Amino acid sequence: MISLHSMPQAFSVEECEWIITTVASSPSQEALLVGKNRDHNQRCAELVWVDNVDGMGWIMDRVIEIVRTSNRDQFDFDLSDFAESPQVATYKAEAGGHFAWHSDIGDGQLAKRRKLTLVLQLSKPNSYEGGDLQVMPCANVFAASRDQGCVSIFPSFNLHQVTPVTRGIRHSFTVWAHGPSFR
């Protein structure tokens, strides 16, 4: 089984820029823009849940097809739904943006059903330094593509991190495909 599946140019540069602009111009309501995670040792990022932003439904239509193809060709997991809202994360150098090593499978009712993690690279690769998405399925660490519009998909149980952003801002879109819990 592959540890990290990349789909270059899954979204166009224009589509990525539109997503960034639309999220940035969304009202800063508490239900819409949930501020920074308070455990700065684990994660420092601003999050916007896409389900709460008008005009973003087309993204999930594309994501569903991408996950369907990737799962069929690479993973063959038992998938049933997307039970959580996708999120756009903004990692800023000035705030020490990062996400330390973690797995996306957890104790929560939905988190324990996560099977695949999909991350869409929204930012231009030269617009920031640091901020690498790294996936560690075993002893090796794989870096996800920084190409704008590239989608990276990996099993949600794999350890992964976003290294500290040292210059600029990194934007990414993340969603999880769910199914029966792994046994």
Image (spheres, rainbow, N blue to C red):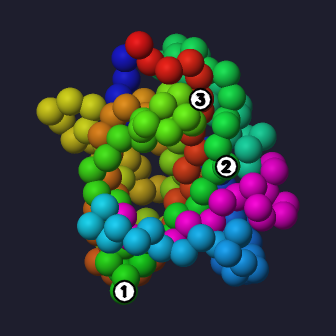
* Residue 73 numbered tag: none
Is residue 53 in view?
yes
| Image height of 105 relative to 77, above or below | below
Determine the residue positioned at 40% across, 71% down.
Answer: 38
**Where is the N terminus found, in terms of image quarters?**
top left
* Residue 85 numbered tag: 2
Percent position (x, y) of residue 8?
53, 44
| Image height of 70 relative to 90, above or below | above
Question: Is the Cβ of the residue at disc 2 closer than 8 Å to that at disc 1?
Answer: no
Give the magenta-colored segment's residue range. 43-58
| Image height of 160 relative to 23, above or below | above
Q: State the residue in front, 52 or 66.
A: 52
* Residue 178 numbered tag: 3
Tell me which label, 3 or 2, sits earlier in the chain: 2
Q: Which residue is tagged 1?
A: 94
Cα separation between marks 2 and 1: 27 Å
Determine the residue positioned at 27% across, 67% down.
Answer: 41
In the image: residue 106, left or right of residue 130: right
Tell me which label, 1 or 3, sits earlier in the chain: 1
| SS of the residue under disc 3 | strand
| Image height of 69 relative to 91, above or below | above
Is residue 122 in view?
no
Q: State the residue in front, 145 or 49.
A: 49
**Where is the C terminus found, in terms of image quarters?**
top left
Q: State the residue in front, 101 or 10.
A: 101
